[in-house]
């Protein structure tokens, strides 16, 4: 049996977890299960902001790809937004530094990358784009059907239409350089992008881990990530 390619997922800080006596660094079990089901070996990495923690060439040795996961809000000061807006939550400067640095490394040096929800926002900010700090009508707990447009083949989903599970109150506003929108929802929200980079790189606003167990389209997206990881 071929070895599973290792997929790096930068962990998220949490103030509490039932199995721990201290604060934690976690990845959503649904996300890890989804990557495993797609044939990858997901590994959670510790976020840090010191030079050694940000040495991605060393830390990603032996990994085939990176999944930039969902999470709390990016500090709006990174893209010129209102950092005092009442809706902004769970901002952590160490997390932001690590995420932005990791995304920049992947897109510069050619690490296959799937960016999910916050992850897609991170990529957009790295590429000089901005975010809507708080959508007029948020997409928390929204399940909807979208159409995948021209240029969406790199996602590997195959279908023209896909049902997606969303949980976000922010969205791409000004699009970053080298990013092509390949899907929008009915209200204009950017739902999927293909990213110009030395290796395969795509972003989705939705959470494939929410519905992978019942939706083959989400598994195909994650298998595409794993295939590119294996190829590397």
Image (cartoon, rainbow, N blue to C red):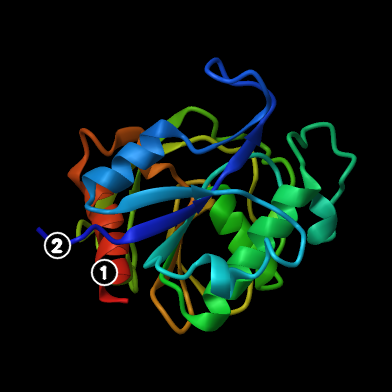
Assign the C terminus to one quadrant of the image: bottom left
Q: Is mark 2 on a helix, strand or loop?
A: loop
Q: Nearer the viewer, residue 160 or 128?
A: 128
Q: What element carries label 1?
A: helix
Q: How many labels does the image show?
A: 2
Q: In the drawing, what numbered circle is on residue 28?
A: none
Residue 45 screen position, x and y as percent: 54, 51
Name the residue at 80% across, 59% down: 78
User: Can you identify the residue that label 1 sits on?
Assistant: 230
Assign the N terminus to one quadrant of the image: bottom left
Is 58 left, or right, of 110 in this rendering?
right
The part of the image, by quadrant, that contains residue 86 is: top right
Residue 218 screen position, x and y as percent: 28, 47
Dots 2 and 1: beta carbons under 8 Å? yes
Q: Which of marks 2 and 1 is nearer the N terminus?
A: 2
User: Can you identify the residue that label 2 sits on?
Assistant: 2
- Which label lies toward us, 2 or 1? 2
Is 96 left, or right, of 18 in this rendering?
right
Name the residue at 40% across, 65% down: 63
């Amino acid at each position: 049996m071929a070895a599973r390619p290792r997929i790096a997922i930068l962990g998220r800080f949490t103030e509490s977890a039932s199995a721990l006596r201290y604060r934690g660094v976690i990845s959503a079990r649904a996300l890890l299960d989804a990557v495993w089901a797609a044939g990858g070996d997901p590994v959670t990495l510790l976020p840090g902001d010191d030079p050694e923690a940000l040495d991605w060439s060393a830390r990603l040795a032996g990994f085939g790809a990176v999944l930039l996961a969902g999470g709390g809000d990016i500090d709006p000061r990174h893209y010129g937004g209102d950092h005092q807006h009442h809706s902004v939550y769970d901002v952590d400067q160490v997390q932001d530094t690590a995420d932005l640095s990791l995304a920049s490394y992947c897109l510069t040096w050619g690490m296959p990358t799937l960016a999910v929800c916050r992850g897609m926002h991170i990529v957009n900010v790295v590429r000089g784009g901005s975010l809507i700090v708080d959508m007029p009508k948020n997409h928390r707990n929204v399940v909807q059907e979208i159409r995948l447009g021209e240029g969406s083949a790199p996602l590997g989903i195959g279908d023209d239409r896909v049902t997606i599970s969303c949980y976000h109150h922010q969205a791409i506003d000004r699009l970053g350089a080298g990013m092509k929108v390949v899907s929008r929802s009915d209200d204009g929200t950017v739902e999927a992008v293909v990213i110009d980079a030395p290796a395969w790189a795509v972003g989705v606003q939705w959470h494939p881990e929410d519905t992978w167990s019942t939706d083959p389209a989400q598994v195909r997206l994650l298998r595409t990530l794993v295939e590119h990881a294996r190829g590397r």
